Image (cartoon, coloured by chain):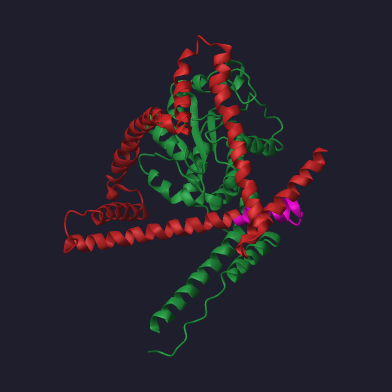
Chain colours: A green, B red
Amino acid sequence: MSDKQPPKQIDRRYIFLVLLIGVTIPLIFPLGFKSEVSGLSKQVYKLVEETPANSTVIISFDYDPATVTELQPMAKALIEHAWRKNQKILALALWPQGVQMAEQAFADIIKKYPDKKYGIDYVNLGYKTGGIVTIQAMGRDFKEIFPTDLKGTPYDEIEILKNVRNYNQIGYIMSLSAGDPGLKQYVMAAHDMFKVKVSGGTTAVSTPGFMPYINDQHQLYGLLGGLKGAAEYESLIGVKGTATSGMDAQSIAHILIIIFIIMGNIRAYKMRKL
Amino acid sequence: MSQFMTVFGVWLGAYFTFSIFSFLYKDNPFYKLAEQIFVGLSAGYWFIYTIYSILIPNLFGKLATDFHGNIMLLIPAVLGVMMLIRLIPKLEWISRYPIALVVGTSVGISMLRYTKSDILSQMTATMINPFAMETTVEMIGSIILILGTVFCIMYFYFSRKQEGILGVTSKIGIWFLMVSFGASFGYTVMARISLLIGRLQFLLGDWLHIIKP
């Protein structure tokens, strides 16, 4: 029997502390790491870029405050890009708190575009329960699903909606999705049934699950994955938002975690040798 | 007053953030209090939200304004009441009917949609000619996609013992699966760190004003 002692286990609270310091410092003193823009984000950008001006587009806010760090910067960047291209935005939510997320995003971006008018350039249709059934029904008749907007204005009295009856009048759908219902349901119902172009952004946890939909069938037109995807989109439209400023911290945290994994493996290797 | 409430809200947010983070050191009363307030608030919020955002606009409001025109809505209303009867133990069986309807409808919709989107479209997307790609990188990527799909499916073929050629291909399939698990782990780490970054941006920006919010 070996008389060697196993290496001492590090108290996990030291790991938390190191991570906290590692993430805090780059937030206060940005390091300016450069990150490459992925092909997936470029596809999303291209979709918005190539959609003609005055097209009506949908941004679906399918998330709540728990994932605001990752998805809200995407929402702001997508609204800004759509408005630069003079596209008209229909905001809706398949998650109840998505309504407030949409309100906040528009309130932030409209400061840069004060000429954009509610009801003419954008409208918030509010929350609708039902998930995939609601998305399917929208393919037949929007008015049936959203008889009024969030403020209670009847559908027919909203300027932006006058020529919108179903998906045939929609340029693309962007779903910012933190789970179900969300992007997956838009792919299944809006794209696969009605052939409308679908794209969007997801939390990093669910990003790998959406990769198979980016294929030559164009089930998805690109994808923004997590904070990195949001930072890439900010970079593409030339905006320095919260996602960009968070990427230095993200990179440092990843380096630290890689170091911890290596240390853990060395320890496991030593333990096996005992 | 509104300025005060904004500042108060930020301080409250900071307090609860620290309370939740304090669990990383060890379990403590601050964490427990924050956790229970969160659970209570969420339950109350959802209860009120369901009434005002779902029941009133979709049911009570429509019935109140045009009862005869919306008489069909009584069917889901009755089904909803039948679902709640579950709370009375003797009549619990009544709730099985609306549950059966919901499950049946969901399965019917999902079967159709999943078959189209997750089986047929995915199979079609894999039936590609890699040698017709524009660039060498795309060609290699397409070959890896086809091989990866085939080998992974072979790993999940259990009707024959995995030995010989099936053993080799299923082992390669495991490697493909491992790579995908690694990618998922990397993305999960990114998501969790993003949550920490979000909280720190709030503390350093909105609360302490050290960085620009």
Q: Position of residue B7 (x, y in %)?
A: 78, 46
Locate residue B206 relative to residue B37 in the image: left or right: right
Residue lying at the far right of the rendered structure: B1
**How many numbered dots are placed on residues in this image?**
0
Residue lying at the far front of the rendered structure: B90
Q: Is residue B178 magenta?
A: no
- Residue drawn 20% across the image and 63% down it: B167
Say which quarter of the image contains residue B106: top left
Q: Position of residue A97 (x, y in %)?
A: 59, 37
Quarter holding the N terminus of chain B is top right
Q: Nearer the viewer, residue A236 or A122?
A: A122
Relative vertical location of residue A138 with respect to residue A200 in this rendering, above or below: above
Q: What span is colored magenta in the figure?
A: B196-213
Locate residue A216 relative to residue A80 in the image: left or right: left
Q: Nearer the viewer, residue B74 or A126?
A: B74
Q: Position of residue A117 (x, y in %)?
A: 67, 27
Q: Nearer the viewer, residue B103 or A198?
A: B103
Say which quarter of the image contains residue A124: top right
Locate residue A172 relative to residue A125 in the image: left or right: left
Locate residue A113 relative to residue A180 in the image: left or right: right
Residue B10 visible in the shown view = yes
Q: Main secondary structure of the magenta part?
A: helix
Q: Is residue B200 magenta?
A: yes
Relative vertical location of residue A98 with respect to residue B30 in this rendering, above or below: above
Residue A147 visible in the shown view = no
Relative vertical location of residue A64 with respect to residue B24 in this rendering, above or below: above
Q: Position of residue B86 (x, y in %)?
A: 45, 32
- Residue drawn 72% across the image and 56% down it: B204
